[in-house]
Image: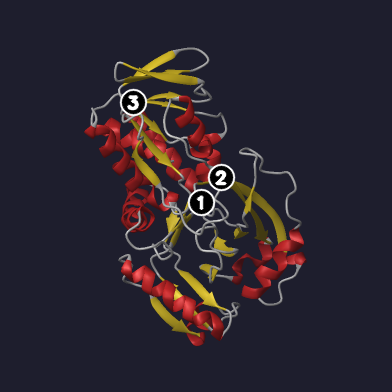
Amino acid sequence: MAGLATAAELAAHGRSVCLLERHPRAGMDTSTHNSGVIHAGIYYPPGTLKAKLCVEGKARLYAFCEAQGVPFRRAGKLIIAADASEIPPLEKLAATGRANGVDDLEMVDQAFVRAREPNVAAASALWSPSTGIVSAEGVVHALRRMCDRHDVAWLPSTPVRGGRVSAGRIELETERERISAAAVVNAGGLYADQVSEMLGGETFTIYPARGEYAQLAPDRSRMINGLIYPVPHTPGHSLGVHLVPSIDGPVLIGPTIRYQDGRADYESDRLPLDAFVEPTARILPGITIDDLRPGGSGIRAKLCPPTQSFVDFMIRADRRVPNMIHVAGIDSPGLTSCLSIGELAASLVLERL
């Protein structure tokens, strides 16, 4: 999605743009296999790209969706403290969010939670009214329509097989042709490190991290009104198994996180459904396996290895090939930030043209 946003931004500036895919499945899978949450900007260290672009991107994305007719809802989010021991980390989250410019956060008590979410168990909570939900697929299609209006050349299922730098330009090789480009935006998602290597760029590693989902059974979907999150226990890796009422109806439960080798392996060794019972019942007491249904999965393209707690987005020029701009490691809050990511990446390209 960041690649589409960048293409739309460059095309709007009158630049000729060609969109290629490193892998036939890489585009919609990475962009749309997520919770569809518009984040407020609470979790990310102040001063980082993730913090800055999330807060900027949230406002831009809401305005974009309204203008383009993309389904969305300002559903609001409660990050709940299950007991008193989780209130201090919740207050720390609130302080981080405010440092990032999220000014509408509020620590609320059990009575507030009960009035808004009568089925949720919490000792206290952090209330984020500006968090919302969106059709991620709708955003992708809206960006695609913008690209079409600006005559962006779209080459789906056309993997980049290699390339070289010659006379200050980058020559890309596909199965059928060679394309000479003044600049290349490497928004290769799960394959961004491979794209950099094949074009003679610097070395980095993308770590595929699969997230799996369950869903509340249809007759249980009205048990929550907005987004319900736990206090995250592994910052930088996952926000914890949370409950999200999606735009198209089902209440999503997840995602989990598992680092893996396969970049397109969405199904092998899937968690059993009963693995979702305990984390869901911590939020909605009394939930049993009969109240759950299997859900989908997605794979995060992370720059953060399992041994670290946080790595920022990589949005900058390559140190070896200056006219290659990396847009890599776009995990959460990539959806929320996509328009701001596109603007930043496009500005870096325009500086070099």
What is the crowding at mark 1: few (fewer than 14 residues within 10 Å), some, or many (at least 20)? many
Identify residue type, mark 1: Cys
Which residue does the numbered mark 2 point to in the structure image?
Answer: 207
Residue 20 image position (x, y, % from top left): 45, 26
Residue at image x 47%, y 81%? Answer: 88
The label on residue 304 is 1
Pick the residue in front: 289 or 207. Answer: 207
Question: Rounded to the nearest whole Å, what is the CA distance between mark 1 and mark 3?
Answer: 30 Å
> Is 158 rendered above or below residue 106?
above
Foreground residue among 286 and 265: 265
Residue at mark 3: 17
Q: Earlier in the sequence, mark 2 or mark 1?
A: 2
Q: Quadrant of residue 240?
A: bottom right
> Which mark's residue is nearer the viewer, 3 or 2?
2
Of the residues under marks 3 and 2, which one precedes in the sequence? 3
The amino acid type, in three-letter code, at marker 3 is Val
Image side of residue 12 versus residue 146, left or right: left
In this picture the colour scheme is secondary structure
Badge 2 element = strand
| C-alpha separation, residue under disc 3 versus residue under disc 2 | 29 Å
Q: Position of residue 149 (x, y in %)?
A: 32, 30
Relative to 39, does residue 31 appear above or below in the rendering? above
**Callout 3: SS:** loop
* Mark 2: amino acid: Tyr
Q: Nearer the viewer, residue 298 or 133?
A: 298
